[in-house]
Image: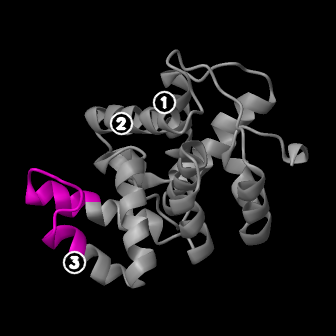
Amino acid sequence: MNSQKYNMSFTAGALLQTESVTIAKLYLEVGDWDLVKEKVISENLLQSRALSTLKRLSHEIIARLSTLNTEELTLLTESEYQDQAYMLWIAVCRYYRFIADFATEVLRERFITFKPDLQHSDFDTFLNRKCDWHSELDSLSISTRKKLRQVLFKMLRDANFLDSKNNIQATMLSTRLIEMIKRNDSRDIKYFTISENAI
């Protein structure tokens, strides 16, 4: 039994790219996540209709972004759309080990072994396999499992790892992002549909 439990609370939102960039810019200005959260909520910077939604989204985004250092947050706010998505994918994988394991053991593995697509059954098989080591997964209802799968596949499409037919797309990292991954944590490359010798 694995003692480190999976955090499965990622149903709050998919990649949340626009909102994440807004919050990252604010953090780079004020340098304090508590102040960022206060300002996001008091000024409704995410333009949510309901306060409960605003609080849930701000908590989720800040949790993910807090896994990034200042250099990574700067790249997130200054780069083009695709690199922003890749940077947020790194943050998601760092915060949610379940997603990191899925990215490494399923998504990337299928890509490097020339299996062209990713299906819902691949997620279901992966989750069922992990139940042997993570008892917390046993308590997930069928509806929750479907929601988790739906959100993860939406993230994969948002980051351009999957097309609309769930065909796996190759990662196209910029030179700046590659160099940053090499400097900060080379293990992050395993979250992408790319072979390590490609960089």
Q: Which mark is residue 145?
A: 2
Asked if the magenta segment contains residue 42, the reply would be yes
Instruction: Name the residue: 47% across, 36% down.
Output: 158
Q: Which mark is residue 124?
A: 1
Q: Which mark is residue 38?
A: 3
Amino acid carrying mark 1 in the image: Asp
Circle 1 Cα neighbour tier, 10 Å, few/some/many (<14 / 14–19 / ≥20) = some
Residue 41 image-quadrant placement: bottom left
Of the image marks 1 and 3, the number of the one nearer the N terminus: 3
Q: Position of residue 29 (x, y in %)?
A: 41, 79
Instruction: Name the residue: 91% across, 46% down.
Output: 197
Q: Nearer the viewer, residue 38 or 78?
A: 78
Asked whether, in this view, residue 181 is left or right of residue 51, the answer is right
Residue 44 in view of the camera: yes
Asked whether, in this view, residue 167 is left or right of residue 139, the answer is right
Of the image marks 2 and 3, the number of the one nearer the N terminus: 3
Q: Which residues are magenta?
A: 38-57
